[in-house]
Amino acid sequence: MLKLFPAPVEAVSLEGLYLAHDLRALGHASRPFVYTNFIASLDGRIAVKSSHTGSLAVPKEIANPRDWRLFQELAAQADALITTGRYARELAAGHAQDVLPLSPKPEYRDLLAWRMERGLAPQPAVVIVSASLDFPLPRTLLEADRKVLVATTARADPTRLKAIAKRGIDIVIAGEAERIQGIRLMDSLHQQGFAIVYSTAGPQILAMLLAERRLNRLYLTQVNRILGGQEYETLVAGPRLIRPNDWKLSSLYYSEHSPGNAGQLFGVYDRLDDPVGAPLSGRTTHATH
C-alpha cells in the first residue's frame, strides 16, 4: 500500500492500517462517533442486482480481500454495528455476503485479540434498524456471542415487538412516526452505552445519517473498474439533501492489488462542520471509555 495523502508519500502495511486511526479515541460526551464504509466501482456502483438471488449486493467484480480486511478493522473498533431488516432477511435465507464481523476466520484472530486486550466484548453489538419489523431473527446472528438490539418506531407492530422481546432482544425506539430518525437513533444508542457506532447499512441509512448530520466519518474504497448496468445502487438513496454535506479528505491510500489489477483507492473523509470529526492528524478529542 502507498499512503498518498497527507504527505509524504510512503509505503504502509495493509494490516493495522485502519486500526491505527484509533477510532475508540473519538467518542464524545453527548453523542456517539458514527462512521461508515463503502466499496464502489469507478462508475459509482456500490451494489448491483444478483443473478442468483435477484436482490442488490456488493458487485463480485469489485469485492476483494484487501478491502474486506479493512472492513474488519473498522468493525473491530466499534461498540455497535448498524444493519437493516433487509440484511437479516438475506442472512436467514443464506444470501448474505457474510455474518457480520468480526469474522472467526484465522486471518482475523488478531482483531479478536485486539478487542480482548482492551477489555471489549468479543463482538460488537448488532443493531437491526427497521420500522416495519418484517424480518426473521437469524439463528446464526443470535448464536454469535454478541448483543443484538432492534431499533424501530413508536408505531411498530405490537405483536412483532412482543415476539422480538420474547427472544431477549432489547428494543430501541428511534422515531415517533413511521420513519426512523437518525438523531433519535443515535441518542438511544448513546444511552445504551455505545460511544463508537459503525454503520454497515446501505444508501437509505446513509441518507438519513447525512440529512440529520449524524455521520462523522466516511471510508470509501474505489476500485478502478467500470461496471455499467441499469439496476444498481449508488452511495446515497432518496431525495436531495436540503443541506449539502461537505467532507474533507483526511487520508488517501493506493493499492495496485485489486480485481483485474487495475488498482484501488482507499479514501478517508471527515465532515467539515463536525465538532467531533476532524482530520486524522492533530486530533485532540479523548475517549469516553
Image: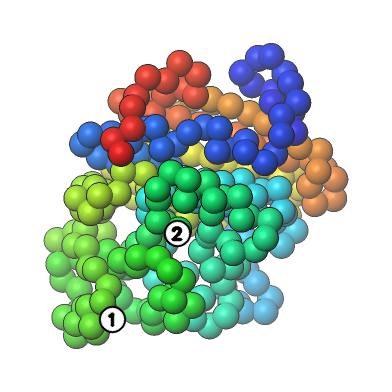
**What residue does disc 1 label?**
167
Mark earlier in primary sequence (1, 2):
2
In the orientation shown, which residue stands out farthest toward the right?
Answer: 261
Q: Residues within 10 Å of mark 2 (few under 14, many from 20)?
A: many
User: Which residue shows up at 39% across the image and 82% down it?
Assistant: 136
Residue 123 is labelled as 2
Give residue 189's position: percent from left, percent from top: 26, 52
User: Which residue shows up at 29% across the image and 67% down it?
Assistant: 150
Q: Quadrant of the N terminus?
A: top right
User: Which residue shows up at 49% across the image and 77% down it?
Assistant: 140
Q: Secondary structure at mark 1?
A: loop
In the rendered view, tell whether residue 82 sits above or below residue 56.
above
Give residue 29's position: percent from left, percent from top: 23, 34
User: What amino acid does circle 1 point to?
Assistant: Arg
In this picture, residue 48 sits left or right of residue 182 = right
Residue 157 is labelled as none
Give residue 39's position: percent from left, percent from top: 61, 49
